[in-house]
Amino acid sequence: MYKNFADEQLVEMAVSEDPDAFGEIVRRWERKIFALCFGMLTREDEARDAAQETFIAAYRNLSRFRGEAKVSSWLHRIAVNQCLTVKRRAKTRSEEYIDDDSGEGDKVFVAPAKMSPGNKAEQAERLNVVRQAVSALPTDLRQVVVMKEFEEMTFQEISETLEIPLSTVKSRLYTALKQLKMRLERLPVEVV
Amino acid sequence: MADESYNSCGFNGDVLSYLYNEMSEAERDRFESHLEACETCVNEFAILSDARYSVYEWKAIEFAPMETPAIIIPIEPVKASWLDVIKTAFAFPRGLVAAGAGFAAIALIVSVSLIGFSGNGIDDKPVVRTIEPQVSTMAAQNPVSSPSPEMSKVDTPPSPDKTRVEVERHKPEIVKASVRVPKNNLSTTATKKNRDSSAKNVNAPRLVRFDDNDDDSLRLAELFNDIDTRDLDELD
């Protein structure tokens, strides 16, 4: 029903007390906001909480959205602020309690336990798209992506291994992620 | 590939470093402060985060459950040939060979050293030393029995230990003797006509050809015979 509406139209509809319109916004952006939060917080549980808080804050502030910026930018801004708040809070806690258990070791992806058959199908389709998108990358770009994501090497290690400057490593990875993003946009898959 | 300019703000490249957590704490704080105000970096970070999470999710779901394959490489033991067996049987351990070589080297050094030390005191050439270096003095004291100064010739070598003095005398009977002095390892050759006093200090051989064991009674008998004959002649 709401698939043919733009994001800005959905916001206007939500402001007009149509909660389902805002639900469509959440369905469209939930995964991307979660990815942003995960990129900033590096912990899945915190990222999910931060993503949820982002949409709650957006819903509460729907009336403040003026339409001057894109809804995506508006949501990104709210998510970034939410993540920064979480980080500041965590930093304060770690100063109070030295034996804070936060760390890189907790960066473990856990797939949602309860997934509907439709969601599983979507996920399988999305993974297939990612696989094809990575395979379609030029060799030099794919090489950097694999070394970074699968081998979990640092930029410096990749630079020394491939014997290329550090800036070239970052440039290749940046270009690879941009191309992946473009290829993934062709298949609008929404997440759980 | 040329480096790309990520965005217009001055935090080019920091978005990736922040996304992959390759920043120091101070750099992270600085970039987060920038992120609060820079809309471009926020959107850039959102795009890269989404792409990265897709790859991350793909890896986590499809590759993480996969077990690491156990790689087994069957290696058949190589059968040793009969020549290798013989070589192994007669092969010495390396340590033993090294110890033997070291011992041989030490023995060689010791042997060379001993030969060198002994060579300093022994000279294969016989050193001739005059038995009587005071010949000239004795000749002056006893001019009758000593030869004349013109008849005596003394050669003095540069080294006092190796002295050769040749004494030539105009006598028909010359006795030559070689004497070895044990302490100084010197050989002495003496040329004398008869027993000389200066030769008493040396264990010289006999200077006459008469042997003590010779029986000289016959000559005495002949002498008596001559005397008896002469007496008879006188009586006659």
Image: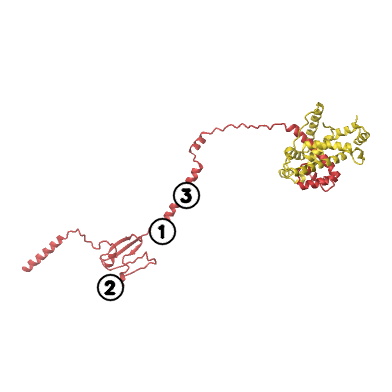
Chain colours: A yellow, B red
Quick check: A31 left or right of A164?
right
Q: Earlier in the sequence, mark 3 or mark 2?
A: 3
Q: Residue furthest top?
A: A117
Amino acid type indicated by mark 2: Gln
SS type, badge 3: helix
- Residue on which disc 3 sits: B105
Q: Quadrant of the N terminus of chain B?
A: top right
Residue type beneath disc 3: Ala
Residue where numbered disc 2 is placed: B141
Residue B230 occupies which quadrant of the picture?
bottom left
Q: Position of residue A46 (x, y in %)?
A: 79, 37
Label 1 environment density (alpha carbons within 10 Å; few <14, some 14–19, many ≥20): few
Instruction: Tell me the subunit letter for badge 2.
Output: B
Q: Residue B145's x, y, as percent?
A: 25, 71
Residue B143 place in picture, x, y as percent: 27, 73
- Residue type at mark 1 is Asn
Residue B23 drawn above or below residue B145:
above
- Give the alpha-carbon distance from disc 2 to disc 1, as whole Å: 40 Å
Callout 2 and callout 1 share a chain: yes
**The C terminus of chain B: image quadrant:** bottom left
Residue visible at 81% across and 45% down?
B32
In what element is the residue under mark 1? helix
**Which chain is indicated by disc 1?**
B
Q: Which residue is mark 1?
A: B120
Neighbor class of circle 3 (other Cα within 10 Å; few <14, some 14-19, many 20+) is few
Q: Earlier in the sequence, mark 3 or mark 1?
A: 3
